[in-house]
Amino acid sequence: MSDRPMAGRWGGTRIGTEPRRDGRATRTKTPFAAWTKRGTSAAAAILFAIFAMSLALPFPPSPRFAPAPVPEPVEWAPTRPGDTLTRGAALSSVLASRGFGSDQIREITQLLQAYRSPRTLRPGTALRFALGATGIPDRILLALTPDSILHFVHADSVWTTRMEPVPFLVDTVRISGVIESSLWSARLGGDVDRFGKKDFEDLVYDLADVFAWKVDFTRDLRRGDVVRVAVERKVRPDGTIRSHHFLAIELWNGGRVLRAIPQPIPGGRYAYFDEEGRSLRGAFLRYPVPYRITSHFTGRRFHPLLKLWRAHEGIDYGAPAGAPVEATASGVVTRAGFVGAYGRLVELRHPGEIRTRYAHLSSIAPDVRPGARVEQGQIIGRVGSSGLATGPHLHYEFLQNGRHRDPLKVEIPGSPSIDPSRLAGFLRDRDEALPLLYGIPIFQTPVSLASGTGSRSRRN
């Protein structure tokens, strides 16, 4: 056999073996293998060249985000007495005292009109000014309400406005009170140092609201009764209270213990229930003004002006002139005006053939007129001495099916209890709220707030 390689079938070179000196066979190198090696080297060279060129090309810079501009601090000018509105002074006079011309004053007042009429700004409203480069203020700060600040900014020859809410801090305070003669005269314990006199006075009125259908605070409280409350407050930076609501209440009254747990209702308000989920709210308030009773319902009473014995078919509350009078229940106004011996009278019609009357008023609220609807707790007038009256007081009557009834003794159904579908959630709220009352110290600081009684109407 010849040692030459054999021709392949298609005339190409066939891959075979050739002897090695050690007698072992080895694979021969073919033209294809040589081309593959050369091709690989060329490809590597091309890739290397491309990589080198890529290093020489400039990469686009990575994007950089400019930091948000930090607003320059505003340097407010020192306040002057003329920066505060006084009685009878117009906003334009304050602006004029700061160097504003008539055109700018007109522009500023027109911008204010979108929020409030300048004429409704109350005396004591303060403004602050920041002086511009020309010496004329280019910024104005106006405390529109206790919870909102209106900013005026002058830039590019145009005034613009921006409303800013006043920040507040939410805290929880706990306080106790031991009754001396009334809720306004009590020995306080707990977070007394965080409660001012006005704060406690507001709390007393709201507390009377909660239990108004269970306790007559003009006659049911006894010396030694105790109240414990946990209150959540929203406090403004100046320390004033923006709003508050009870988290839990406990009242010890004559051997019984009443507790109240809030549940939110539409309108940002709260309804209160006892620990079993029964509503504390009744269809009628126990009294239209939170003052002591001076004359009870009776079939025989000597009239101080007529000098004769006659029935007294209502209850008299000794209240100062001008004290607000509230509707004890929602209803429709049937009479509102001067009615003989009643003086100025408001009569309301309620469901169930019930009517209530409020007499001897000094004035009647403007929106209270025959046919108008009023809501429970709405102020319908002010205490006075019109008609046959020896002095300022409120005469209150309760009629059912046309007959006078004693408002303190008539049985009126209450509001519904917690819906069964919500009861489990209410019980969880109760179990979280009541422990807030535990451990509040009692009998700590004697405080008398009797002088503040009657300065504010109850709030619902």
Image: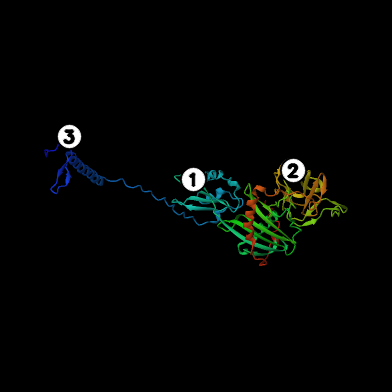
Instruction: From this view, report whether residue 81 is shown above or below residue 193.
Output: above
Residue lying farthest top?
Answer: 10
Label 3: which secondary element: loop
From the top left corner, tell me how far across and down residue 146 is, in percent: 58, 53
Between label 3 and label 2, give the one nearer the viewer. Answer: 3
Q: Nearer the viewer, mark 1 or mark 2?
A: 2
- Relative image position of residue 214 (x, y in whole percent): 73, 54
Check the picture and name the quadrant holding the N terminus. Answer: top left
Real-space Cα separation, disc 3 to disc 1, in angstroms: 98 Å
Q: Work out whether residue 158 or residue 406 is closer to the camera in this orientation and state it.
A: 406
Relative horizontal placement of residue 132, taking residue 344 as reference (left or right): left
Mark 2, secondary structure of its residue: strand
Residue 457 as seen in the image, left or right of residue 123: right
Mark 1 or mark 2: whose residue is earlier in sequence: 1
62 left or right, relative to 422: left
Assess whether mark 2 and mark 1 are in contact (beta carbons under 8 angstroms): no
Structural distance between the alpha carbons of marks 1 and 2: 48 Å
Q: Amino acid at mark 3?
A: Gly
The 10 Å Cα crowd at callout 3, few under 14, some 14 to 19, many 20 or more, is: few
| Residue name at image x 67 percent, y 48 percent | 420
The amino acid type of the residue labelled 1 equals: Trp
Instruction: Give the residue drawn at x 45%, y 54%.
Output: 73
Q: Secondary structure at mark 1?
A: strand
Provide residue 229's location: percent of width, then percent of height. 65, 59
Q: CA distance from mark 3 to mark 2?
A: 121 Å
The label number, if any, that marks residue 8 in the structure image? 3
Is disc 3 in contact with disc 1, using a CB cutoff of under 8 Å? no
Residue 159's tag is 1
- Of the numbered discs 3 and 1, the one sitting upstream in the chain is 3
**Three-letter code, disc 2:** Val
| Residue 9 coordinates in the image, percent (x, y) | 18, 33
